[in-house]
Amino acid sequence: MKTPSFLQSLLTFSAIISVIGFGHFALHTSLHSLMLISLIIAGVSALPLSQDKFTSIRKAMNTGIQTALPAIYIFLLIGVLIAALIQSGTVASLIYYGLTFISPAVFLPAGLLLCSLMSIATGTSWGTVGTAGVVLVSLGQTMGLPIPIVAGMVVSGASFGDKMSPVSDTTNLAAMSSGTDLYRHIKSMTYTTGPAFLLTLIAFSLIGFFYSQHQLVQIDLSQLLSTITDTFSISIITLLPLLVMIIMSVKKYSAEVAMLSASCIAIILATWLQQANLSTVLTSLYNGGNFNTGLENLNHLFNRGGMASMMWTLSLALMALALGGILNHFGFLHVLIKGILAQVKRAGTLVATTILACFIGNIAMGEAYMSIILGGNLFGEAFDEQSLDRSVMSRSLEEGATLTTALIPWTTAGAFFSSSLGVNVFDYAPWAILNWLNPLLSIAFAYLGIAMFKKHTSR
């Protein structure tokens, strides 16, 4: 198979970025249509490099999708889980208790800490966003807080936990791809992610203080609470599905098994405690709920979920993964990054390039896993030449790949978070403070020589 030139790789990637950027922001065109055009551009560019023309291009697309099959299963299961948790009264109970006991002044920092701890314990930002995140966004909306701000808080906390957890797949993958010890990798991340998280916590505390005056008037609060209790049987028992899911995740059961178990328990609670019709409950697992509470905002909250609600997200992610398969298989990204890397002379520039390359990889391939693996293969020797410890590289891979994937609408994570929380990625991205602050802070530290550990030095 032929290798593309640097110029061809640059032109291909520039054309794709231009199509997506101009089409989405200037023409307001559907992302699906823009992704289809990008697929055509990548396929046409790859044709001269392919020996058997379209056959190898199709195989490359299939390979890109295959790498994310576990994520695709989780996409569908999260839709099922959200619907089941609504039918069981779990979401309603959490909203009821939240409105009763939590003030808007502390809601945002408390929610950030909750999502961070849950994600550290379970090792999954997806599970956190799909469960606690859905409830927090619903609760924040009923409190009168802007939904994009609440969604940004959820994504920040979930991403922090996923990045720092020793049971997270991306954390282990980054350490493995860099050839460094897992806990050395986590310790290295604390030097950049710790300050970024503290600044994020302060920011959300200040934002929460600003909205502390936005208390629901008593008559509105009473109406919300009474409507919830008229629609659902509120009980602490309804929290059982979430408890089971957290315990199973901590015990390192697969995400699919934990979600299915929680969904099954929620279905039992829906038919037993909520006295719901079994046929209605099962139908909601695909179509979502069909509640009519008399309050439009509660109807919007309780009629979410179901596999059908994830189809927009899933179809976009499949196209993005197919595009990433072409760009990766035919070497477009490899050539592009190698060409840029040849110009890097300073350690600070190397860290910045690594983070930027992973961000570009996410844009092109739609998946953080592929960006981490590609970065691990490309940057190792450059870090060795600068006498930098490989843990500096591993944390740079995470900061460029794990954190930024939530800020791109067509990545699996961005599409999933947007669909689960009901908020456009571009709307919550400015408020996902940790996700963009941490990479910027890491680059600044690198140029200042802070936490740039050398080989064989103790920390």
Image (spheres, rainbow, N blue to C red):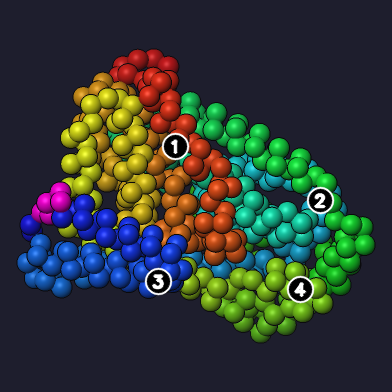
Query: Looking at the image, which is closer to me, 3 or 318?
Result: 3
Q: Secondary structure at mark 2?
A: loop
Label 1 or label 4, whichever comes before in sequence order? 4
Relative horizontal placement of residue 369, taking residue 127 as reference (left or right): left
Q: Which residue is mark 4?
A: 296
Three-letter amino acid code at disc 2? His
- Whether residue 11 can be seen here: yes
Residue 161 coordinates in the image, percent (x, y): 54, 42
Q: Are marks 3 and 1 in contact (CB under 8 Å)?
A: no
* Image vertical order of residue 239 relative to residue 186, above or below: below
Relative horizontal placement of residue 225, taking residue 438 as reference (left or right): right
Residue 247 coordinates in the image, percent (x, y): 61, 50
Q: Which residue is mark 2?
A: 214
Q: How many angstroms separate mark 3 from mark 2 (CA)?
A: 38 Å
At 29% across and 42% down in the image, what residue appears? 375
Res 32 label:
3
Q: Are marks 1 and 4 in contact (CB under 8 Å)?
A: no
Label 3 or label 1, whichever comes before in sequence order? 3
Q: Which residues are magenta?
A: 3-7
Q: Which residue is mark 1?
A: 439
Three-letter amino acid code at disc 3? His
Residue 408, by quadrant, is bottom left
Relative horizontal placement of residue 376, taking residue 223 as reference (left or right): left
At 25% across and 36% down in the image, what residue appears? 379
Q: Secondary structure at mark 1?
A: helix
